Image (tube, grey):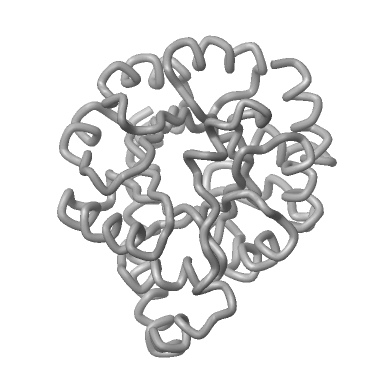
């Protein structure tokens, strides 16, 4: 168990180090004024809140993910267009698209591709450390930004959230424990996501969501993330106070992720 804790700690450290290198290169390649000239930059964003609270939708934020550091290749056959459209047809409230290339096999063009064929909010799923990435996300067509409490200081969270809000995007804060939650909350957030995956051991437990839900103030949307593979668990999480559910691997590991989601939603 100890070795996997070390491995996971190292993975996150490695991701952050690599991400800082990538940001430095991206800044040299593209200026902020170029980002602002993107066709998507002036586009009004879809509201995460409106979409999650829409009773005709599932409350699921469905994720497009090719691979992960812990699982390796999950699905490198399906295209981002077919998967995300399949999700939307199955009643997804929002989409999550991985743009981290080195560790997750994603790409900025995946977000653009998803944006071009969908009319629901899209979360840019990445390791956001710098204001440049927020501006970049807006230029790629993102509606929602993810801020991970374990890799950001409270001040960084507040500043990145403020910039995101000024650009019309919604902000999802991801926490793993009560300490992260308490130190990271600020007025600029729209939603708080509880990641059910233990960053120390890779193990996943839905109990994590139940333990933290009462500590999330009612003015934030509440989202349970990771490890939701049983449709019956949605009802329990909803009654505990959750508005949304981030699900990716459970659908992506199937041959037809959109169909997998459709089957899942029909059992909720």
Badge count? 0
In the image, what residue occupies the spot 64% across and 70% down?
A: 109
Residue 182 picture location, percent across and down:
18, 32
In the image, what residue occupies the spot 40% across and 21% down?
A: 209
Q: Is residue 15 left or right of residue 238?
A: left
Q: Is residue 240 left or right of residue 200?
A: right
Q: Is residue 24 above or below residue 236?
A: below
Residue 48 picture location, percent across and down:
50, 44
Residue 110 picture location, percent across and down:
65, 64
Residue 41 in sight from this viewpoint: yes
Residue 88 picture location, percent across and down:
73, 43
In the image, what residue occupies the spot 15% across and 54% down?
A: 155
Q: Is residue 191 left or right of residue 214?
A: right
Residue 16 in sight from this viewpoint: no
Quarter containing the C terminus: top right
Q: Quadrant of residue 89?
A: top right
Q: Nearer the viewer, residue 232 or 78?
A: 232
Q: Nearer the viewer, residue 166 or 78?
A: 166
Q: Nearer the viewer, residue 105 or 241?
A: 241
In the image, what residue occupies the spot 54% across and 81% down?
A: 38
Quarter containing the N terminus: top left
Q: Is residue 155 above or below residue 51?
A: below
């Amino acid at each position: 168990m100890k070795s996997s804790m070390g491995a996971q700690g190292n993975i996150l450290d490695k991701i952050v180090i690599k991400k800082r290198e990538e940001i430095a290169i991206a800044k040299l390649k593209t200026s902020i004024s170029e980002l602002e000239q993107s066709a998507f930059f002036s586009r009004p964003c879809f509201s995460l809140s409106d979409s999650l609270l829409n009773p005709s939708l599932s409350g699921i934020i469905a994720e497009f993910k090719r691979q992960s550091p812990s699982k390796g290749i999950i699905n490198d056959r399906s295209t981002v267009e077919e998967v995300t459209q399949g999700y939307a047809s199955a009643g997804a409230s929002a989409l999550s698209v991985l743009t981290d290339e080195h560790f997750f096999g994603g790409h900025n063009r995946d977000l653009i591709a998803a944006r071009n064929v969908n009319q629901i909010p899209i979360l840019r799923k990445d390791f956001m450390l710098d204001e440049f990435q927020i501006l970049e996300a807006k230029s790629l067509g993102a509606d929602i930004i993810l801020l991970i409490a374990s890799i950001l200081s409270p001040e960084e969270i507040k500043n990145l959230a403020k910039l995101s809000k000024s650009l019309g995007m919604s902000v999802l804060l991801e926490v793993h424990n009560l300490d992260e939650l308490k130190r990271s909350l600020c007025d600029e957030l729209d939603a708080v996501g509880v990641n059910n995956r233990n960053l120390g051991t890779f193990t996943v437990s839905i109990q994590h969501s139940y333990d933290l839900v009462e500590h999330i103030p009612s003015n934030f949307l509440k989202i349970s993330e990771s490890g939701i593979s049983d449709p019956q668990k949605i009802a329990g999480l909803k009654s505990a106070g959750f508005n949304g559910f981030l699900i990716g691997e459970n659908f992506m590991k199937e041959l037809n992720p959109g169909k997998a989601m459709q089957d899942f939603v029909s059992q909720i």
